[in-house]
Structure formats: C-alpha cells, structure tokens
Image (cartoon, rainbow, N blue to C red):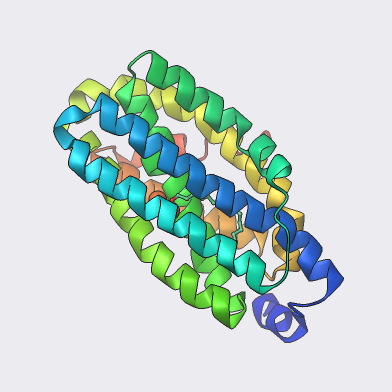
Amino acid sequence: MPQLEAIAELDFHSDVYKDAYSRINAIVIEGEQEAYDNYIRLSDLLSDQQAELINLSKMEKRHMKGFQACGKNLEVTPDMAFAQEFFAGLHKNFQDAAAEGKIVTCLLIQSLIIECFAIAAYNIYIPVADPFARKITEGVVKDEYMHLNFGEEWLKANFAASKVELEAANAQNLPLVWKMLNQVAEDAAVLGMEKDALVEDFMIAYGEALSNIGFSTRDIMRMSAYGLKTV
Ligand code: PL3
Ligand code: FE2
Ligand code: FE2
C-alpha cells in the first residue's frame, strides 16, 4: 500500500516537499492559465458557442487563482519558467492548429488531453494533499469533468467529419503526454502521487472520452496507448 505509506511520511513543510511543489504547483498554475487562453481562442473559432466557452474560460481563471493560493499557503514560489517549458509542445501544437482553423485538433488537445491529464492528476492528488489544497482541488476537479464533457459532446455531434483529424491529432499529441508524465513523475512521487496511478487514471478518462465520442474499443486501445511504448 504505497499510497498509505506515502501519506504517513508526507511533511508539507519539508524542503524536499516544497522543492517538488514549486514545480508541480507551477505546472498546474500554467496549465490552468493555458486552458483559460485556449477556451478564449476556441470561443472565437466556435462563435455559436461563444458564451459557453467564455464561461469555461472563467472557470479556468478561478482554478489558476486557487492553485496560486495553494502555493502561497505552503510558502512556495512556483517555478513558472519550468512550467512554460513543460507545456511548450502542447502549446505550440494548439497555436498552430488554431491558426489553421483546426477546431477538432484544438478540442482534442484542450478538452480531451489536457482535461483528462488534469482529472487524473487532481484525483490522485486529493487524498495526499494538504487540507487547504485538498479543498481547492476537490472543487476544481468537478469543473474539469464539465470541460471534458464539452469536448466530448461537440466531437460526438461531429464524429464522422472529425474522425480522421482526431486520429492525426491523437498521434501528434499523445506522445507529448507520456513525455510530460515522465518529466513530472519524480516530483509527483515526492507529493505521494505514483506514476503508474497517473498513467492508469489518464488512460481510463481518455479511453472513456473516446468511447463517448464514438470510437470503437479497437480504436480506443490503439489510440490511447499511442507513443506509450517509446517513453
Ligand atoms: C485544465 O483545466 C487544467 C490543466 C492542468 C494540467 C495539469 C497537469 C498536471 C500534471 C502534474 C501532476 C500533479 C498534480 C498535482 C496537483 C496540485
Ligand atoms: Fe481547470
Ligand atoms: Fe479545465
């Protein structure tokens, strides 16, 4: 029961914990900021759902502020330069897709990949978080399911026309997720979060999303493990 041992050993005020937290906290702050930017961008691209997307973007801004408060509460300064570098690959792919008007790719990156990554990470963080951060994260994760649902619903309604682009966007972006997970694994472990659990929860959330959109089990197996063996 490694998770339980980890809980017993966690010292939220130790230098080791705070050092790891300075990067993980920055990652979630940057992730929420980028999610804000991405939903604003999507609100231009999907003008008929503008109001809803702006609403989602506002939630992301609130999440960002919540996680900033978590860092402050532990007297940790988030390493934002590290976090920007961490998101650089997904950031560039989203920007390029948006510039080409590729809504399907944008939705796959933000509403499926990033939201599933957040859902997996936050659910695993909640039981090992300090009490202040736990409360904040519990509130945030509920919203992330709504964001995932937005992407699922849109892609489901446009499945036939989106399928080819979704497969290509998956192949382009999923390897980046495994790379990001590897980069964060050591720091996450210091916070009591296990890499295997993160991978597992991500695959479950992402696989369920692909299924809801309309992909077959065979497609889901192939797509959700894409690039996993090479990391
Ligand atoms: C979308 O609404 C938010 C995007 C955030 C992405 C988060 C990725 C998290 C990976 C780091 C794992 C540790 C999580 C710990 C939580 C404080
Ligand atoms: Fe969020
Ligand atoms: Fe979100």
* Residue 70 image position (x, y, % from top left): 59, 68
Picture quarter with the C terminus: top right
Residue 147 or 108: which is nearer the viewer?
147
Residue ID at (58%, 58%): 198
Furthest residue toward bottom: 8
Q: Is residue 221 visible?
A: no
- The total number of labels drawn is 0
* 139 in relation to 210, above or below: below
Residue beneath the point at 47% across and 18% down: 96
x and y percentages locating residue 110 in the rendered image: 41, 38
Residue lying at 66% horizontally and 39% vertically, measured from the top left: 86
Left or right: 102 in relation to 196? left
**155 over 118 or under it: above or below:** above
**Residue 151, quarter of the rendered image:** top left
- Residue positioned 21% across, 36% down in the render: 50
Locate residue 57 relative to residue 194 in the image: left or right.
Answer: left
Instruction: Give percent across and percent down for residue 165.
Output: 34, 21
Q: Residue furthest right?
A: 15
In the image, 108: left or right of 199?
left
Q: Tell me which corner region of the image, top left, top right, bottom left or bottom right, holds residue 121.
A: bottom right
Residue 219 against residue 19 in the figure, above or below: above
Viewer-proximal residue among 11 and 192: 11
Residue 154 x %, y %: 21, 37
